[in-house]
Amino acid sequence: MLLASATTANASEIRSTITDSVQLTVDGPAIQSTRIGSSYSVSGSNITSSSLGRLTGASTTAPATVSAGSYALTTAGQAFSFSETSLVGDVPVSSQATLSSGQFTAPNLYGDSVTSSGGTAGSLAGTISATGVATVTAGGAGTTAIGQRAVELSVFK
């Protein structure tokens, strides 16, 4: 009689991964500016106009100006309502301010604007030692420093 014996295969794997990183960020400057247009409106009841108010003189180099209208009561002693509203808009700009040391020197802004000044690195720094210890040094405003160690251990059988 023949005896057969087989051993079971055993595949094992152990994997270890260590990742060290330092991330340094300095925010850049930004300007978001929306030009406001000019508008004029007038409304009322029991009002007579001999001339309506209006916007005049708008150009690419100067804002509009408001010309006054001439209004009077239609029937004296009667109730009336009158509303006149004007908004003088922005003059278009053809170029934006230049950067100096990561900052806008004198930005051209429209009526609806959001600005963010850029960060300054200052003493922003980051290192990783031979033993994998991350060290970060804070910078000026608008900076971020992140030191990270990620350890992964996988065992397969």
Image (cartoon, grey):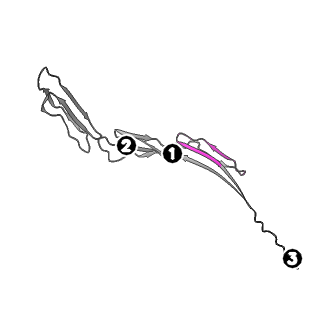
On screen, residue 51 versus residue 94, left or right, reads left
Question: Which residue position holds label 1?
Answer: 27
Residue drawn at x 44%, y 46% is 99
Q: Residues within 10 Å of mark 2 (few under 14, many from 20)?
A: some
Q: Residue at x 75, y 65 (%)?
A: 11
Q: The residue tagged with tag 3: helix, strand or loop?
A: loop
For label 3, the residue is 3
> What kind of element bears circle 2?
strand
Amino acid type of the residue tagged 1 in the rendering: Asp
Residue 157 in the image, given as x and y percentages of width and height: 74, 61
* Whole-percent x, y for residue 59 in the image: 23, 43
> Which numbered disc, 1 or 3, marks the residue closer to the eye?
3
> Residue 33: which numbered mark, if any?
2
Dot placed on the residue nearer the N-terminal end, 1 or 3 = 3
Give how far apart the Cα atoms at labels 3 and 2 are: 88 Å
Q: CA distance from mark 1 to mark 2?
A: 19 Å
Q: Which residues are magenta?
A: 130-148
Task: Residue at 45%, 41% (x, y): give it.
Answer: 116
Q: Earlier in the sequence, mark 1 or mark 2?
A: 1
